[in-house]
Image: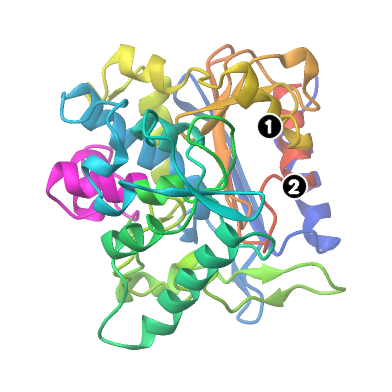
Amino acid sequence: MRDKKQLLQDCMNRMIEENELAGVNFLVLKDGKEELYAEAGFANREEKKPFKRDTIVRLYSQSKPITAAAAMLLFQDGIIDLYEPVGKYIDSFNNQEIVEAGVRRPVRADRPMFIKDLLDMTSGLVYPFTDTISEIETGNIYNEMIDRFSTDNMMSTMEFAERLGKVPLAFQPGEHFRYGTSADILGAVIEKASGMKLGEFMEERLFKPLNMKDTAFYVPDEKQDRYAMAYNCYGSEPVPYSGNNLGIRDDGKKNAFESGGAGLFSTIDDYANFARMLMNDGTFEGEEILTKRCVRFMTSPQLTDAQQNDLYGWSTLGGFSYGNLMRIMKNPDRAGIMAGMGEYGWDGWLGPYFANDPESKTTILMLTQRVDYGTGPATRKFRNIIFS
């Protein structure tokens, strides 16, 4: 009989020896109970500090499912309606422009950006690159934000959103799927609708009830010794990364910008509690966090056929659709990984990974800190050991 834990540990060790990763841990839950855990490598190679269960990492985009859950709380409580215009909550999102053939044009008056567009990445908002007006202007805002880290006037979540609302969209809202800053704007909507800072709302409604004691938008001083170094692993040896990608502070210190798309820091056991809650139809240790129907909605594919065509360009997401800031398996026979119908989750820029598979009642969680990794070869190898 295959010993999955040994196979996983052997594969992990190879990934470390080959410098695919500097450090990693991996947790498997079955019916909400731990089935196996493994770890390898270092949270800090220079200090010979091992990657452990309580190692704190930057989640980057693995923050997005938590932000979606925060929005679902307001949704089920009747505070927000997903077809409300974003402009109801953030003034600059009224009278927006788009870029067509390099020219700014008004967004159609009959179709504003909806909150649902933020959850499904169909808003027209983009991440900062260098090819288009939208990308360049978005990047300029991030650059200013980072420049202000060393001042007493850091850019807040709401200021970022107000500024981004003045950047032209890449397309008319709802016409396409494109991965971008939608979750950050959703975080600002949550702030406005709840009357609380995003971190405060998440702490009260998610982190405390789920006993996510090491999850926040910063790493407190007393926990800094557990904070992992990120590494660039594209050379012969892993090299420590120093940078503030997407406005996330590399030092883990407090940031006025609480990024719903990328800003959370956490541990593998904290995120496991969040995953357990979703797998258990919204209930955690007897307390209902989200209703069963709300979880079913949150974990269902949302893209139209036209929007789905845009996702096909993401070659490593074969078989998946998207909705509520997560990938959702729709066609397992088209996937390049072993996956069940309805599996959902997401990953992050530095390689953390989360998946719930309701079909097999299995949760997998992986934390690592490799620059520009997302779902990499190691991630797919690990999960195929488990799901095979």
| Residue 70 occupies quadrant | top left
Q: Determine contact: label 2, label 1, CB under 8 Å.
A: no
- Measure the alpha-carbon separation of dots 2 and 1: 21 Å
Label 2 residue SS: loop
Q: What residue is disc 2 on?
A: 376
Label 1 residue SS: helix
User: Taken as a whole, is the magenta stretch helix, strand or loop?
Assistant: helix
Using residue 72 as the reference point, say whether residue 22 is left or right of it: right
Q: What residue is disc 1 on?
A: 310
* Residues shaded magenta: 186-215
> Which amino acid type corresponds to the residue marked 1 in the rendered image?
Asp
Q: Residue 380 magenta-drawn? A: no
Q: Residue at x 75, y 72 (%)?
A: 238
Q: Residue at x 21, y 30 (%)?
A: 80
Q: Earlier in the sequence, mark 2 or mark 1?
A: 1
Rendered view: 29 above or below 141? above
Q: Nearer the viewer, residue 13 or 79?
A: 79
Q: Nearer the viewer, residue 312 or 15?
A: 312
Residue 194 horizontal/vertical position (percent): 15, 43
Rendered view: 267 above or below 146? above
Q: Residue at x 75, y 27 (%)?
A: 318
Q: Considering the image in quadrants, where does the N terminus appear? A: top right
> Which amino acid type corresponds to the residue marked 2 in the rendered image?
Gly
Binning the other alpha carbons within 10 Å of mark 2 as few (below 14), some (14 to 19) or many (20 upward) gives some
Q: Residue 193 magenta-drawn? A: yes
Q: Which mark is drawn over residue 237?
A: none
Residue 25 horizontal/vertical position (percent): 60, 50
Residue 83 horizontal/vertical position (percent): 31, 25
Q: How many marks?
A: 2
**Residue found farthest to the left:** 195
**Residue found farthest to the bottom:** 151
